Each structure stands twice: as structure tokens, then as C-alpha cells.
Amino acid sequence: MWKANKFVNILLWVLALISIFLCIWAFVRSGATTDLAEKMTAINPMLIWSYILVGIAAVLTIFLPVPQVIENPKSAIGIAVGILAFAIVIVISYLFASGEPLNFNPGHPPVSEGTIKFTDVNLISVYIMLSATILVTIGASIANVFKMR
């Protein structure tokens, strides 16, 4: 392709090494104590790192295809279809998501309706995409069996 392959490979290795280090650090630090507050302080950097990884993925998803679109403008149609499909999945997930409060968390402060709705949207969208991936994999396998004959 172009120089992005080398850049992406180096970036993936760096991110993987940082992730491994953080996992080991959180595991060792949370196992060294029985205090729940200290365990949470060991896990918080992992949550922050996951947000950073999502941001990096979003930036790379937006900017890496730009040179390909400049070289081949027809490829923009495929990218637009992918973005539209993703938006449709999110809208469907939002329509199915519930914001009802949960009743099984005694001793904890109540969770806001917005947080529950946001979590439901994320879970439902993951379920939809996982189901679509499984169906496409099975469909492609069946199509290959008939194509070989």
C-alpha cells in the first residue's frame, strides 16, 4: 500500500506493549491489597487507557483512508456505505435500548437513566455486529462450498 503499513505496524506494537505493561501492573497492584478503593485505583489507568485506544482507533479510521480516496475516488462510496451501516446499527440499538433504573444494586447510589441508556446502546450494538459477523461468516462458508462444486 503506502508508508501507512509500516506506521500502523509500529503503532500496533507500541500500543500492545503499553497494554501488556498496564495489564501486568494492574494485576500486581490489585492483587497486593484487599482494600476495594486501592483496587479501583489500580483499575482506573486501564479504563483511561481503553478510552485512549478508542480515540486512536477513531482517528486512524478517519484519516488512514484519505490517501486511498485521493488516489481512487470510487473507494469513497465503500467508506460511505460502511459509515452509513454503522450509523444504522447505532440508531437501531438506540431504539431498542431501555433507560429503566435497575433494582438489584442495594447499597449503591442509583445509576442515571442516561448512563443506563448509553450502556444499553453499546451492548445492543455489539450484539448486532457480532450476530452480523457470524451470519456473514457462515454465509460466506456456505457460498464457498457451492462455488467449489
Image: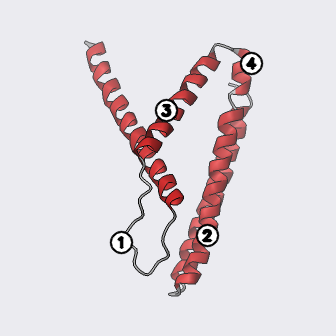
Amino acid at the residue labelled 3:
Ile
SS for tag 1?
loop
Tag 3–tag 4 contact (CB < 8 Å): no
Distance Cα–Cα, label 2 vs label 1 = 24 Å
Graded by Cα atoms within 10 Å as few (under 14), some (14 to 19) or many (20 or more), the crowding at tag 4 reads: few
What residue does disc 2 label? Answer: 44
Q: Picture coordinates of residue 112 (x, y %)?
A: 52, 64
Q: Total marks drawn?
A: 4
Q: In this view, does 103 lie above or below 54?
A: below
Q: Position of residue 127 (x, y in %)?
A: 39, 44
Mark 1, residues whose alpha carbon is within 10 Å: few (<14), some, or many (≥20)? few
Instruction: Please report the residue visible at 47 percent of the width from the left and 48 percent of the height from the top.
Output: 121
Mark 1 lies on residue: 104
Residue wearing tag 3: 88
Q: Few, some or many C-alpha atoms within 10 Å of disc 2 (few <14, some 14-19, many ≥20)?
A: few
- Amino acid marked by disc 2: Asn
Label 1 amino acid?
Answer: Phe
Circles 3 and 1 in contact, beta carbons < 8 Å: no
